[in-house]
Image (spheres, rainbow, N blue to C red):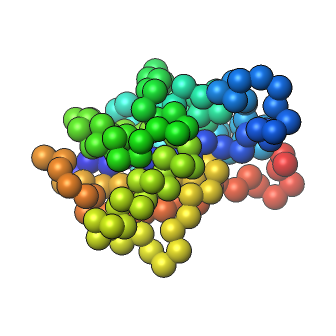
Amino acid sequence: MRRLYLVRHGKAGDRHRFDGDDRDRPLTTNGLRQAELLAELLAESGAPDRILSSPAERCRQTVAPLAKQAGRDVELEEWLDEGSDALEALALLTELEEAVVAACTHGDVIWGVLDWLARGGVDLGARPDASKASTWALDWPDSPAEGVPIRASYLPPPVPPRGGIT
């Protein structure tokens, strides 16, 4: 079984209040905590063989703890950036040969992928979601990885312990 973790970046600062290129907008303190918790959550299933990310700072920061824990580099991919073609991103991710891949991207790309999966007959549940710091685990048979995944599971954003950082 091959698995793709499609991760939405954690909580970032308000894009309308950020002075600078939106690609440089970082995670908030809560977003950084979400990234740490996400690394712990995904590590429970085993370390990814590859970790990909949109070049945006908030995406890089989201998967940095996972990369550190897995002993992997984060590979930056323009086709995961905000505004990218979701079908192209999914096609490129599907072609990867590694058993487990984590890819961090943006809400518009994830919603585009989910729309395509739903039209392909993949059960996304009654109310699909793509909250910040959430993950979709998509599973394909070992080979070849063509067509739609055989299973899609939503992992909600990890919740900091009560009294944690907000």
Instruction: Where is residue 45? Give x, y as percent.
Output: 42, 49
On screen, residue 95 versus residue 102, left or right, reads left
In this view, 97 is above or below 8: above
On screen, residue 1 versus residue 63, left or right, reads left
In this view, the residue farthest toward the bottom is 126
In this view, 52 is above or below 102: above
Work out whether residue 30 or residue 164 is closer to the camera in this orientation and state it. Answer: 30
Q: Residue at x 36, y 72 (%)?
A: 123
Query: Residue 161: which quarter of the image?
Result: bottom right
- Residue 82 visible here: yes
Work out whether residue 102 or residue 111 is closer to the camera in this orientation and state it. Answer: 111
- Residue 100 visible here: no
Q: Residue at x 64, y 51 (%)?
A: 132
On screen, residue 17 versus residue 112, left or right, reads right
Query: Residue 46: which quarter of the image?
Result: top left
Q: Residue at x 37, y 31 (%)?
A: 50
Work out whether residue 142 or residue 15 is closer to the camera in this orientation and state it. Answer: 15
Instruction: Where is residue 130? Give x, y as percent.
Output: 56, 58
On screen, residue 90 versus residue 11, left or right, reads left
Instruction: Where is residue 117? Give x, y as percent.
Output: 35, 61
In this view, 17 is above or below 72: below
